[in-house]
Image: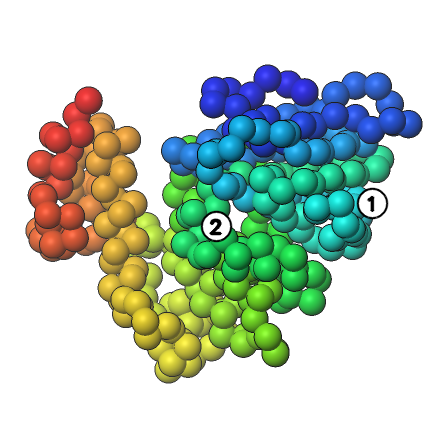
Amino acid sequence: MSQLPAPQRLADHIAVSTPRGHCVGTPDTYVTPMGDDMWLTRIRYDGIAVTDNRRLPGIALRILVAVPDNDRWILRRRGDLAQANPCVLAVADPSEPLDFRAFGPGNAVVLDFPMSWLTLPVDTVRRGIDGLNDANPLSAFVGEHLTHLGGVGATCPMMLPDLAPPTIQLIRSLLLMSVRTGEPSPSTELIVRVKLYIDEHLTDADLCAGLIASQHSISTRKLYAEWPNDGPALGDYIIRRRLERARDALITRRHLTIPAVARSHGFVDPTHFAKRFRMAFGVSPSQWRRDNAG
């Protein structure tokens, strides 16, 4: 297995090798950070065996979500067969015994992050993992999204941290839908798709409810009706995500002026941007940049 950059997140939780009966040679791994404690690993293999590493107690719980690109694989959790082809995703809690086998040449994208980021009880997460199957309407969507992340990691890795929040939200929705009884509501998948679309188009100055609705083949009225009422309104959500993205850009893109950062994140009026920034974070954009100069 190729050496991972410190800290060796994926290697801390699983052991990757070539199963018996397959060609000699360890799988190739390519690791890209998606944030402070979230890692995207691309693996190329000719047969692969993934098992849990025995670890010391007290290490934080994590989640592994894998998308193999062939359909010849099985996943055992706690010694029992949990998933087998043609499931799109292999999802596991590496604090429990796991054994994943894929046969023949292939590639996989693996996401590794703390379970606490899902903001769900541990029991809920584990029940969601145990109940996951192809009948879940979000399974294929999550698989496609992680495959897309693998491509981004290979070609434009600096974009990955911006995609971390919607990815966590998408996996959270996947597991919640898995534990839900009865027929799942299609509105859940719609809102997940809408939030992903918003994150991918935050720099568009004309991003609005009408455009979002038309891109999802629904009316603006239906979009507002389906939007969750237990959080910020749609317009406030867009502004907040733009401000969060701009806050990071003020640090990582210091060559840009503050008005340029505002314009590149959908704010036409720099004065309006500065006002909303202060309301959201308690400091002005210029003060934020100075305070984080190091």
Q: What amino acid is at disc 1? A: Arg
Q: Residue 180 carries which label?
A: none
Which quadrant, please, contains the C terminus?
top left
Of residues 119 and 268, the one nearer the viewer is 119
Q: Which residue lies furthest to the front in this view?
A: 57
Q: What percent of the width, then of the height, locates residue 54?
A: 62, 29
234 left or right of 222 in image:
left
Q: Say which residue label 1 marks.
A: 72
Q: Which residue is drawn at 58% across and 59% down?
A: 128
Q: Which residue is drawn at 53% across and 38% down?
A: 112
55 left or right of 288 in image:
right
Task: Locate residue 160: give its quadrant.
Answer: top left
Mark before the other along the chain sequence, 1 or 2: 1
Q: What percent of the width, then of the height, locates residue 106?
A: 76, 36
Helix, strand or loop for disc 1? loop
Instruction: Inspect this view and state whether residue 274 appears.
Output: no
Q: Which residue is drawn at 10% across and 37% down?
A: 286
- Looking at the image, is 154 positioned above or below residue 163? above
Of residues 201 and 27, the one nearer the viewer is 27
Q: Say which residue label 2 marks.
A: 167
Q: Residue furthest right?
A: 21
| Pointers 1 and 2 in contact (C-beta within 8 Å) | no
Query: Label 1 to label 2, Cα distance in Å?
Result: 26 Å
